[in-house]
Image (cartoon, rainbow, N blue to C red):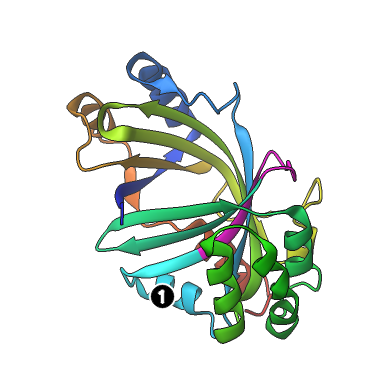
Amino acid sequence: MYYRVEDKYLIYEDEIAYLKSRLAQLMKRDPHCPEGGYLIRSVYFDNRWDSAYSENEAGLDNRVKIRIRSYNNDSSFLKLEEKSKKSGYTHKEDAAIRRETVEKLISRGSDSASAALLSSDLLREEGFLSKKLYYRMNSEMLYPVVIVEYEREAFVDPAGNVRITFDKNVGGSPLVERFFDDNINAVPALDRGCHILEVKYDELLPDYIRTLLDEGFLRRTAFSKYYYSRNNMILNGERL
């Protein structure tokens, strides 16, 4: 199984402007990333015991998250993803999934019994990943619990297969049935002006990129967009 390093940092607006100007001289903009970036929106699944949330809170190293993702709210291109972490490295599998199937899965909101009943549409999707989600929804009572969205700009470098992303305005909503709405009224997951920098690469990060990231103003973090978005629901009176 193919694993990658994924480092995360807290970053602020003025630092983003500085880093972007420097990275533009060292790396190429992701060819799939339009000028100004794009919106990523994901609906995450957890079980009735909130295992993914609890494992993140406990800082367990080996864990798995399941999500369905859209880009710029384009419902014609949706991806089912399984992201796993092991010994500090990450691995991601993905597969296309139809809007009709997603609508079924989220149509009754965050309810594990209803989600399991509606999960049979996954068996009509292509690939193994949808079957794996079907099994987990029925054996572990997995169900959709939160929407997370943010704006992303990305840079890439073939040396080390490096991908650096600026993820701005991270927010979440418990109203999973609104996944396809234009506006989900997301609650911010971070303080105003604070965003996330992610650095993903294979075994080695090129020195010319590492030197730039080691200038001293970046703050390393174990930030999980899923965990902090759900945690905000607790702080705002939403029950897990």
Q: Is residue 130 above or below residue 149?
A: below
Q: Is residue 13 above or below residue 233?
A: above
Q: How many marks?
A: 1
In what quadrant of the picture does the C terminus appear? bottom right
Task: Please name the residue that numbered disc 1 is placed on.
Answer: 55
Q: Quadrant of residue 230?
A: bottom right
Question: Dot 1 lies on which element?
Answer: helix
Q: Is residue 198 visible?
A: yes
The magenta stretch is 66-77
Q: Is residue 75 magenta?
A: yes
Residue found 33% across the figure and 45% down from its top: 219
Residue 124 shown left or right of residue 64 in the figure: right
In what quadrant of the picture does the N terminus appear? bottom left
Q: Position of residue 226 (x, y in %)?
A: 53, 61
Q: Is residue 86 magenta?
A: no
Residue 66 shown left or right of residue 9 in the figure: right
Residue 109 shown left or right of residue 191 in the figure: right
Q: Position of residue 70 (x, y in %)?
A: 66, 47
Residue 79 shown left or right of residue 177 in the figure: left
Question: Camera-side residue: 168 or 181?
Answer: 181
Q: Quadrant of residue 157?
A: top left
Q: Amino acid at mark 1?
A: Glu
